[in-house]
Amino acid sequence: MPILLSLVALIAAAQPEAPVEVRPGEPPEGVSAVPISETAEPIGLAIASFDADRDGRTSRVELNEALLRSFAAADRDGDGQLGYIEYSGWATVWLGSATALPGPYAIDADGDDRIAREELLAEFGRHFVRLDRDSDGAISHAELLTVSQPRLPPLPRERTPRRRAIQR
Ligand SMILES: [Ca+2]
Ligand SMILES: [Ca+2]
Ligand SMILES: [Ca+2]
């Protein structure tokens, strides 16, 4: 009898483990059902890089000083204003792309096709207040992160009714 038992044990040990059953629409065990990603807006890149004293936080003074410094560097023709082309150069350096937000139309509050220092400071000031979630007067890196759940691919749809709907 003990021989038979050990034989059963051996056979059981030789059997491959039953595959983990994964039901459609459910993640396998150990994988979070809610994938989280943390991203920063382009304006967050600029604000983080304006942290002059490297304490990991950008104060309003650091923001304004860096904006004025970078404004002067981007003002190629030295007229004290940034044309839209000059602004796209500024945005490429500090926001990472000429088309990143905030765009020139949002900043150019008086619509004269030129960006004045005050207009740049005012627009960034608005974003500063928005991003300073704890209202302590400085933007931490944590305040620049947006936690989001990436979109999952849509479920396949039945085609026929949809085509009919488009034809109508
Ligand atoms: Ca700082
Ligand atoms: Ca203007
Ligand atoms: Ca803050």
Image: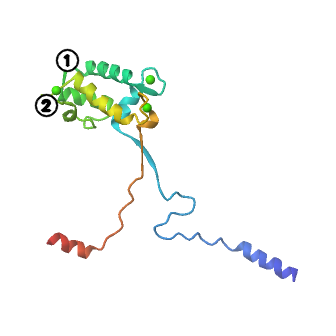
Front-most of 83 and 116? 116
Q: Is 132 drawn above or below residue 23 in the view shown?
A: above
Image point 65% across, 70% down: which residue?
17
Q: Is 90 drawn above or below residue 145 in the view shown?
A: above
Residue that carries the numbered disc 1 in the rendered image: 80
State the SS at label 2: loop
Q: Position of residue 41 (x, y in %)?
A: 35, 39
Q: Residue furthest right?
A: 2
In the image, is 2 to the left or to the right of 112?
right
Q: Is 128 drawn above or below residue 73 in the view shown?
A: below
Front-most of 52 and 132? 132
Residue 95: assigned label: none
Residue that carries the numbered disc 2 in the rendered image: 111
Q: Give the image quarter of residue 156.
A: bottom left
Image point 30% across, 32% down: which residue?
126
Kind of residue sitting beneath label 2: Gly
Q: Position of residue 147 (x, y in %)?
A: 43, 46
Q: Quadrant of ligand 2?
A: top left
Front-most of 10 and 129? 129
Cβ of mark 2 under 8 Å from ligand 2: the answer is: yes
In the image, is 141 to the left or to the right of 31?
left
In the image, is 9 to the left or to the right of 42?
right
In the image, is 79 to the left or to the right of 140?
left
